[in-house]
Amino acid sequence: MTIKGTTTTAARPLVEVGNVSKWFGPLMALNDISLEIGPGITGLIGPNGAGKTTLLKLLTGQSKPSLGNVQICGHDAWLSKAKAHVGYCPYGDATWDELSGRRLVQVTAGLHGFTGDEAKRRTEAVLETVGMVDRANRPVHTYSKGMRQRIKLGQALIHDPDLLVLDEPLNGVDPVGREELNELFQRLANAGKAVLISSHILNEMDELANHILFVCRGKLLASGSLETIREVLDDYPLKVRVSCGSPRQVAPQLMALESVKSVSVEPPEDLFLEVQNPNRFYAEFGEFATADDIQLSRLKATDTSAEAVFDYLMERAARPE
Amino acid sequence: MDSQPNISRFAACLQVFRLTLRRQFFSRQTIVIGVLLFLALAITIVWAVPKPWNPEPRTGEQLAEQILSPLFMGFLLPLISLGYASSTISGERTGQTLVYLLSTSIPRPQIYLSQFSAVLLLTMGITLGCLGTLCVTVGMDGVAVLREFAPVVTLATVCYVALFLLFSAWLRRATFLALAYALMIETLTANIPGVVKRITVSFYANSWLYDDSPLDLAPNANLPPYEPVSGGIAVAVLLAASIGFLALGMWLFSRKEYE
Amino acid sequence: MSESNSDNESVIQHKAWFAAWPIARTAMHLVFRRKLFWVLFALALLSFLFMFGAIYLLATLRQQYPQVEQFITGMLKDLDGSGTTFLNFMVAQGTVTMILLAFAGSVLAGNDHSRGGLIFYLSRRINVVHYAAGKLLAIGLIISLTTTLPALVLFIEYGLLGDTGTYFGEKYPIFFGILGYGALLSLAVGLLLFALVSWMPKPVPLVMLWGGLFVFLPILSRILTFAMRKPGMRRRDAMEESPWRLLDFWNDLYIVGNKFFGVDKPLFTGAAVVVCAVCIISALAIVVRLRQLQHQS
């Protein structure tokens, strides 16, 4: 069962993936995935090994689907016509390390067919965009991880692509850098570009993406706007730890809340709750904590990791409709 | 940025060519090749200098027989070719930088052709330069030898580069297969009677050298039977093999999915 | 208390030497799972199969046509079952062993050095010497797979297909000769390979340098031997006696290896000095490089 939201745009989408499956020998990396991506920021989320990179490789024409088809701006993604519309920032750190940052971006401009002044103009513009102008003359092998990410992003932007595919672009970037790059992604999206960002960190995409694609074990579990996904997550059973002075007294009162499924006491002062609907639970718990004279020292959700959410979605997908 | 870029496919291919040339030339293999060439030249000079017990200057035929055939044709030529050609695509692959070339809008066969041109230019420059330098050590006699060897070395280099680049497009560890080919197949089959030796590049290169040469380059009749083909056939086979390897490499590179 | 600590240290140090085997086993596993290794190994076994068949054929001829057998062994000294038979077989394995080692060296040690895998080993209770011992053991075992082990099989075959009791009774020193020469090859070539891989982990330059040592230098050595030959000296004598032959390291090992089979060759002292010098320089190069890498990581 795939949860579908409102990913499709009125105009023809930039990316159309139709019933794509991909095998690597006996391993099924992608299983009958169909999706469309239009302008704006799309987050591709899944735990490690979910099939995100395989999907990105299909979109960027690095590999071919075993079944189905991938179209970029109406062209088969494997063909060079499609690649003219795509900018790709791969996951690894590898680049042509012996070159300087400026030279690397300029070489990429050359690889896209830009020459002379046009190549130089684009190089400077891109370096400005990614905030690397002042450090661009250093060889890439002297760069930190964050600086490498920026230069890699620069080379992906050099030909002004309609679709920007970024494989974990915030990996290794410091918080200030993240903020800057997120603003850049937002600017590109506002300019009508499609920006596809893969990540295994749910919170990273929370603020950034307009659309989310959940992938797990090769399957597309959910796709759509954040609102749609959140509605899905409201059914997600959350585990919460509450610390208070007298857990044995508080436990029956918490059990009375509608959203709480079970309570277990962990002496000396912890309670573990399993709640059915997190949004409702937080509302009820707020009222509960202010209404009664209870001393609570801590409230913490213990399994909000992306993997736990994906496990839930996977389990949900396996249920009969 | 402009949304209507004025791009040139030729310029893009030229960039692949320049990038490949630069990356291959500024590499450790160039240092190793430099050391080997220096040693080869030094030994050739020692060999060529008249000795008190042998004051006669060396002849072109001696140069061809004692230096060029075993040292240059038998080792340096295939080694220089494999050093550059086998590391071109497989090197980008193991260094995880091939993705940057493959995600451009240049069609894959054109990327392959550009890389082939770059490696060929580099290898040809080094092999012909080395051949010329070795030949001049024996003076004017060497110029005649150079005239005999240069076209053979040129075509053999094209063939080796096309073959080893094909290995490179095919396998991640192409260098080892190329080494096994260059040092085992080429050497061992040369001494086997019959037609097995005809699978090697060196057989046709040597056949061309032996055929109709003003220098007496053919091997001694007492040595294992070489049974060369005619010069015309040798040239035709080397040309056909080069084109065949190149076409096969382009086809393979354009279809293969690289991790 | 301090005495007890020192005892513990000594036990830990002693146990660390046992880590060499798991390191070697893991390294060999890394090599064995590559298809290319098996292709090269199959090439290496070709001459073994040829020799195996030839020995069988000779044994059959010895029974059915003794004169033909005598004629053949008279022509082909390499098949007379003496120490030379097995020594020459091990020497003939040189080219393919060299190619196999270039590949194995790049996989089992080169990757550690170029991709920072060394720190994984050194984060355990072992130091660079234990690590190097493990890798050298792996290289030595791979060399043995293509040289010592097939030579032993041929020796046993030769004995079993003939007058078994007499052959093994008289020729048993050959068994130790094969083991001794195998150990020399494993140690000297292993050290040299590991030193080169440590300083040049990338496969292409490694292959070229390795090819330079085992193909280029022998060619140069032959050119110089003939070029510097005194008038009247026969080519065969020059090949045996010219000091320029010492440039060929595989030949140096062959000269020293003859001693294990009770044969004295000219240039023995020079060859022994070259082999010892290569081993010592290689060992120093390995230690210096590993310490350097250890500090970098």
Image (cartoon, coloured by chain):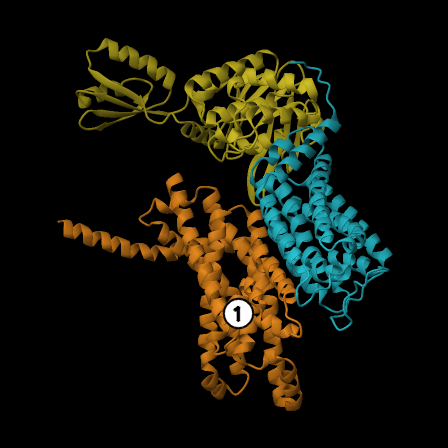
Chain colours: A yellow, B cyan, C orange
Q: Residue placed at 29% from the left, 56% from the top?
A: C15
Residue A37 at what x, y percent from top left?
60, 21
Residue furthest out toward the top:
A291
Q: Is residue B87 shown above or below C77?
A: above
Q: Is residue A103 shown above or below C200?
A: above
Asked whether the viewer can see residue B206, the reply is yes
Asked whether the viewer can see residue C42, the reply is no
Q: Residues within 10 Å of mark 1 (few under 14, many from 20)?
A: many
Q: Please name the residue that numbered disc 1 is placed on.
A: C254
Q: Is residue B14 shown above or below B28?
A: above
Residue C30 at what x, y percent from top left?
48, 52
Q: Chain of mark 1?
A: C
Residue A16 at what x, y percent from top left?
64, 25
Of residues B154 and B49, the one nearer the viewer is B49
Which kind of residue does numbered mark 1 sit on? Tyr
Using the rendered view, name the quadrant where residue B115 is placed: top right
Residue C239 at what x, y percent from top left?
61, 70
Q: Residue placed at 50% from the left, 74% from the top?
A: C258
Of residues C218 and A194, the one nearer the viewer is C218
